Image: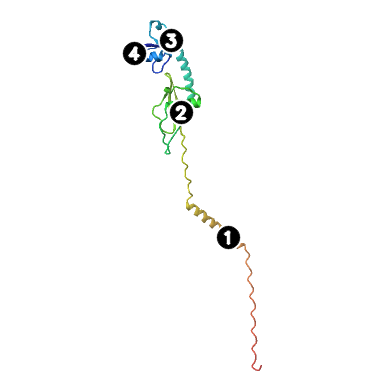
Amino acid sequence: MKTEVILTSNIIGLGGESDQVKVAAGYARNYLFPQRLAIPLTHANKRRIEALKQRRAEREAHEFNTMSELAKGVTKLICVIKVKTGEDGKMFGTVTAGMIADELKHQFDITLDKRKIHLAHPIRTLGEQEVELRLHHDVNAMLKLRIESTTPLPAAPEAAEPEGRVTEKRGKGRQEAAPAEEKAEEKKPKAAKAEKAPKAEKPAKKSKGE
């Protein structure tokens, strides 16, 4: 069963102050009326519509100014979102509007309804992204995101030096050492040739008479 009410506050998806809307009777009775978000549509309450319209105009002007300033600020920010990934770098799940809203509050103390964060497509990859913020029906802004992994990257194996290079270095060292050895040998004084020992004289032959 539906009942008609006059909204006294702005309710996203339903309407703003002074709007006359039809809602479920239980919703109005159990939520809207106790929270003072709406009043029953009666002749007496209709007199309050003009005052509610004035309140709405003031609220919307304030929101416009606030969101215009916010739009100028967020375009200079980079919101970092940490996600879990597998060893292959693929994300587990996607980045949601709720995650972005939480990080805006945590990193920059900006309170923003997640319904104002428009994701054109699911964010499933690491790196830099941009999302649209629909801050007001007359104010939009782009927010830069940097999606980073909390999973440590596997250590890259150390590249072994090619054997050819080692052999080449060793060979080169040997080649460089050879000339040095030759120079050292040239500097050594040549040993004087040993004089030949005199030949021993043969004993004289004895004569037959002796």
Look at label 2 and name its amino acid. Answer: Lys
Q: Is residue 107 above or below residue 191?
A: above
Q: Which residue is mark 2?
A: 144
Q: N-terminal of the two: label 3 or label 1?
A: 3
Could you tell me how far apart the alpha carbons at marks 4 and 2 are, in whole angstroms? 44 Å
Task: Mark 3 vs mark 4: give the one in front.
Answer: 4
Q: Quadrant of the C terminus?
A: bottom right
- Please tell me whether residue 38 is drawn above or below residue 81 in the rendered image: above
- Asked if disc 3 and disc 4 are in contact, CB closer than 8 Å, the reply is no
Identify the mark nearer the N-term, 3 or 4: 4
Q: Residue at x 40, y 5 (%)?
A: 44
Give neighbour class at mark 1: few <14, some 14-19, many 20+ (Cα, 10 Å): few
Nearer-N-terminus badge (2/3): 3
- Secondary-structure class at tag 3: helix
Secondary structure, mark 4, is: strand
Residue that numbered label 1 is attached to: 181
Please, what secondary structure does the residue beneath circle 1 have?
helix
